[in-house]
Image: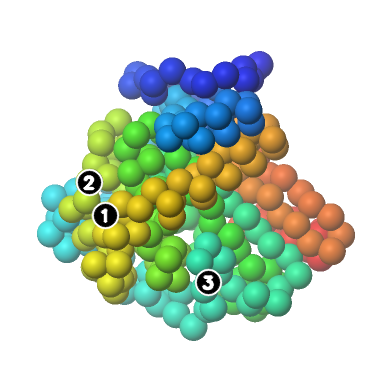
């Protein structure tokens, strides 16, 4: 598939069916286009479709907005006692860094988060074998940008990992626009965020704009095909995992290879 270095059109709604286990980008934005558009105050949206369904195991969007979420205790227990600073989880002295590029509304990202991330946290992050960076890459249109703003706002209070994990547990259908202020606030309350600060940060483009711009540039430079994509770096080099959802075992093996 050729990737065109131009600003993409608005996101399409219908499924393309590029495969059930992987999200596929329709267009990759060139670095020059990314910088030019965001510098002008615009936002980059990349059209991407998938036949992978979202889990229906979470609370409804209305319940989330009302504070009736699933998985709150599970999430708080998972990350309790692990150092967290902004987008980074784990021992800051760890010599290996696992960086995930993900969209909160992406079903494949949800699959990684629910099926494999708990084991990565327990077996790799908690023991200090690696630290984990989570970078929000909104590629499913305007609602994904709304979601990314909320995630980056949670990041300002060092609660990004609880926030993203709870989001995935309660993720809604990707074909609906559900990343409303009420939905985002419901998650924020559940993980104990200061709502006044959260709202201020969520609405402040000076906070989330540069982060989204930087992620778009990195993704374009690396030629990522969609979310989730991973870069794992360590003393022995760098590995890129992109094209399929990696298991916890794959992550652990790659960490060992670069350690």
Question: For numbered disc 2, what is the local secondary structure?
Answer: loop
Q: Are marks 1 and 2 in contact (CB under 8 Å)?
A: yes
How far across and how far down the image is residue 64, in percent? 19, 56
Pointer 2 residue = 180
**Alpha-carbon span between mark 1 and mark 3:** 21 Å
Q: Nearer the viewer, residue 66 or 119?
A: 66
Q: Quadrant of the N terminus?
A: top right
- State the residue lying farthest toward the bottom: 81
Q: Look at mark 1 in the image and give the residue it sits on.
A: 184
Horizontal arrangement in the rendering, residue 92 relative to residue 186 (left or right) = right
Give x and y (percent) for residue 236. Answer: 87, 60
Q: Residues within 10 Å of mark 1 (few under 14, many from 20)?
A: many
- Distance from label 3 to label 2 (Cα)? 26 Å
Give the mark, 1 or 3, whose residue is nearer the N terminus: 3
- Residue depicted at x 56% and y 38%: 216
Q: How crowded is mark 3: few (under 14 residues within 10 Å), some or many (20 or more)?
A: some
Query: Which of 238/129 is in front?
Result: 238
Say which mark, if any, is on residue 249: none
Q: Which residue is drawn at 51% across and 48% down?
A: 210
């Amino acid at each position: 598939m050729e990737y065109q270095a131009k600003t993409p059109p608005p996101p399409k709604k219908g499924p393309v069916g590029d495969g059930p286990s992987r999200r596929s980008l329709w267009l990759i934005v060139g670095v020059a286009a990314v910088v030019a558009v965001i510098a002008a105050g615009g936002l980059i949206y990349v059209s991407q479709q998938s036949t992978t369904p979202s889990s229906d195991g979470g609370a409804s969007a209305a319940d989330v907005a009302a504070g009736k979420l699933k998985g709150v205790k599970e999430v708080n227990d998972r990350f309790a006692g692990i150092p967290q600073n902004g987008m980074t989880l784990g021992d800051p002295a760890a010599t290996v860094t696992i960086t995930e590029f993900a969209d909160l509304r992406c079903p494949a990202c949800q699959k990684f988060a629910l099926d494999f991330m708990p084991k990565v946290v327990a077996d790799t992050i908690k023991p200090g074998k690696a630290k984990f960076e989570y970078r929000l890459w909104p590629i499913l249109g305007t609602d994904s940008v709304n979601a990314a703003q909320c995630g980056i706002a949670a990041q300002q209070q060092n609660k990004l990992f609880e926030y993203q994990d709870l989001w995935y547990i309660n993720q809604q259908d990707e074909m609906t626009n559900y990343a409303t202020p009420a939905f985002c606030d419901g998650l924020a309350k559940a993980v104990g965020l200061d709502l006044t600060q959260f709202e201020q940060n969520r609405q402040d483009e000076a906070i989330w704009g540069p982060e989204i711009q930087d992620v778009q540039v990195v993704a374009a430079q690396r030629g990522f095909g969609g979310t989730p994509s991973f870069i794992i770096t360590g003393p022995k080099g760098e590995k890129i995992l992109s094209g399929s959802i990696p298991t916890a075992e794959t992550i652990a093996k790659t960490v060992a290879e670069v350690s």
